[in-house]
Amino acid sequence: MNVTQERRLASLLLALVTSLAVFAAFFLVAGAPAAAQAPDPATEEEMYRIADKLNCPICQGQRLSECPIQICQEMRAEIVDRLEQGQGEEQIIAAFVDRYGIQVLNQPPIEGFNVLAWVMPFVGLVIVLAAGGWVLRAWSRQRPGEETVEPATAQIDELPEEYVRRLEEELEDYES
């Protein structure tokens, strides 16, 4: 190898090492904020427990812990931030209710007019069971004074002659 080829090889190696260093530095710098923002497992578990009690403010009936849209990701991040600031579950939920209204709660509170939402299913069940019992009792009870249907007791002598003849022919065909 001559000197020119050695210089080319050295500059190529230098370019390769520099590219690898820049590439590694980029991923270290880009990955650092994500690693710094990742909550510890206990905080993340607490966040999901709180997020299960809240609804997405946009999607109807979708829990905050399950909704994939951007606002829900931001709300979950806010829950983590508030937990890391030392706020409790009640404070966090109250802050979201203040911002988005009572419909953000997954379960309505048991107070005021919302008591009906908790009581009415049980009242409806009692009414349906009582009505069903009343109907069954009415069906099963024999009312006095009502005529009962007697089984038919016609004698063969009382039947028209044509029916008797036909009956005897069919019995003969059946027996043979």
Image (cartoon, rainbow, N blue to C red):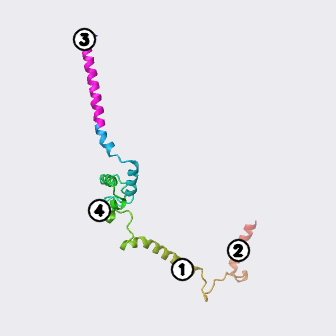
Q: Nearer the viewer, residue 91 or 149?
A: 91
Quarter-wise, where is residue 25 in the image?
Answer: top left
Residue 136 coordinates in the image, percent (x, y): 56, 78
Residue at 57% from the left image edge and 80% from the top image edge: 137
Q: Earlier in the sequence, mark 2 or mark 1?
A: 1
Q: Amino acid at mark 2?
A: Leu
Mark 2 or mark 3: name the one nearer the start of the chain. Answer: 3
Amino acid type, residue under disc 4 in the picture: Tyr
Q: Which residue in the protein does label 1 denote? A: 134
Q: Judge the density around disc 4: few (<14), some (14-19), many (≥20) Cα neighbours within 10 Å.
A: some
Our reading of the magenta stretch's main secondary structure is helix
Find the distance from the CA under tag 4 to the CA under tag 2: 84 Å
The residue carrying mark 3 is 3
Measure how far apart labels 1 and 3 are at the Cα level: 109 Å
Q: Residue reaching furthest front?
A: 86
| Relative side of 134 to 173, left or right | left
Q: Which residue is mark 2?
A: 167
Q: Quadrant of the N terminus?
A: top left
Badge nearest the viewer, 2 or 3: 3
Residue name at image x 29 percent, y 63 percent: 98
What residue is pinned by disc 4? 100
* Disc 2 packing (10 Å; few <14; some 14–19; many ≥20): few
Residue 168 image position (x, y, % from top left): 73, 73
Q: Quadrant of residue 49?
A: bottom left
User: Disc 1 marks which amino acid?
Assistant: Trp
Amino acid type shown at disc 3:
Val
What range is drawn magenta here? 5-28
Q: Earlier in the sequence, mark 4 or mark 2?
A: 4
Foreground: disc 4 or disc 1: 4
Q: Does residue 109 sit above or below 35 in this rendering?
A: below
* Corner quadrant of residue 135: bottom right
| Separation of residues labelled 2 and 3 (CA atoms) | 127 Å
